[in-house]
Image (spheres, rainbow, N blue to C red):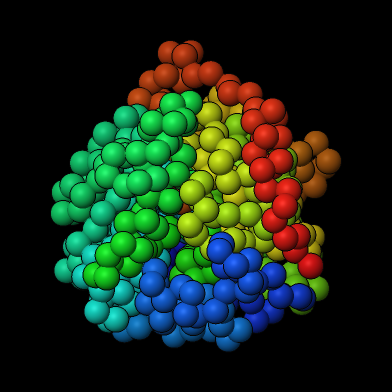
Amino acid sequence: METTKYLLNETALPKRWYNIQADLPSPAPPYLNPGTMEPLGPEDLAPLFPMELIMQEVSQDRYIDIPQEVLEIYRLWRPTPLYRAHGLEAAIGTRSRIFYKYEGVSPAGSHKPNTSVAQAFYNKKEGRTRIATETGAGQWGSALAFACELMGLECMVYMVRVSYEQKPFRRSMIHTWGAEVVASPSDTTNTGRAILENHPEMNSGSLGIAISEAVEDAANRDDTAYSLGSVLNHVLMHQTVIGEEAIEQMKMAGAYPDVVIGCVGGGSNFAGIAFPFMRDKIAGKEIDFLAVEPAACPTLTHGIYTYDYGDTAKLAPVAAMHTLGHDFVPESIHAGGLRYHGMAPLVSHALQLGLIRAEAYLQNDIFASAITFARSEGIIPAPESAHAIHGAITTAKKADEEGVEKTILFNLSGHGHFDMAAYDNYLAGKLVDVAFDEAQMGRALKAIESLPKPA
């Protein structure tokens, strides 16, 4: 097994987050108040978020300084390594060069602490003592539990029920770091109780439902803020430490990517690797950006671009995004972190501008590529991250068919050590490819026909 690792000295850790809003050819449409459908102001978000995060959300500054306290915690695992995937290249017989940025070395095993630490810091600075959040597969919930423990904050996690049952060790991580976690929909909120009583077909849960529960929790307590692990502008910005490091590491390798790939659920890890390189595309350089998603929840490839609620109960801000409808409940695939009905507004806007493209894959194909990667590179990837691996393999094979060599960079956003039940099912031939429910999407989209349309 041959590989090449490119490591930056910790003194090269980025000191600023990159804000792509400063460079976009046109601004993304504003968020709307879910009650009035008027553009949101800072005062509308103040009950949920600390003011410094609200200002980051709307900032047009190209760079935002990373607080020293956050940098000190980042140094526990950052800078993260960049690898040249010689083993994978040999396994698939490609002439292309494949690189991957590995975020699974963080304490929580994924890219999520890049923003959880920052969000916990700003909440503590403003005097909040408790944070409520949702989590899909558990990566975000465990990352926020980790950050809150470091900052001395209480943490309440609403975990999508199907993942709560599929991934018990993610729950164990959350408990180990001192947070509370319940299966969503739960009986602890009005939203959860209503879903359990009136919509038994939705009892497997979704990120939209879990978001509603967390927002309700935060809105009803003065000591509690709400924290989101993806989708929002400031979250995507915090993740750009990934791409900022990767730019310098690719220089060390004497290479520059022709293609940059990441999986997308809410969009944060894709934005983290892609947005810093996207500056060059906006300036005229030829780069292909590929966002990959599950075929069972194909938000970018099958959803429509419109205003929609960020959650099932219509409590969260209304955003212009690609969506399958806020009460769309995806099938219970193992990539629980990618089961969100919508997409980050900035990622959606980038697709509208033609800066990125998207593909959707079936989970058996995803796991086949994950096995190939694990056996050639040694790392067992999370099911979510395996989408990026499959995208890289597909891209390399297509380049070979066309007789060209490409330099491919993807974000390996986390390890799969707590997803072994899914691997067991795949290896036993029990993993089922789930068909996308067009009828359910049609019903969900019909329910939002009256919402405003982006300009």
Residue 291 spot, x, y in % from top left: 65, 50
Viewer-closest of 25 and 411: 25
Residue 287 spot, x, y in % from top left: 74, 62
Viewer-closest of 210 and 414: 210
Residue at left offset 53%, top offset 59%: 231
Residue 253 spot, x, y in % from top left: 56, 64
Residue at left offset 25%, top offset 73%: 128
Q: Is residue 280 above or below residue 319?
A: below
Quadrant of the image occupied by residue 203:
top left
- Tell me if I can see residue 206 in this picture: yes
Q: Going by the picture, which residue comes out furthest to the right?
A: 402
Quarter of the picture holding the N terminus: top left
Residue 400 spot, x, y in % from top left: 76, 39
- Tell me if I can see residue 381 in this picture: no
Is 378 situated left or right of 331 in this image?
Answer: left
Quadrant of the image occupied by residue 421:
top left
Viewer-closest of 241 and 95: 241
User: How many numbered circles are shown?
Assistant: 0
Residue at left offset 21%, top offset 49%: 180
Q: Going by the picture, which residue comes out furthest to the top?
A: 429
Is 171 situated left or right of 166 in this image?
Answer: left
Is 119 situated left or right of 355 in this image?
Answer: left
Quarter of the picture holding the C terminus: bottom right
Residue at left offset 82%, top offset 42%: 403
Is 385 situated left or right of 259 in this image?
Answer: left
Viewer-closest of 430 and 406: 430
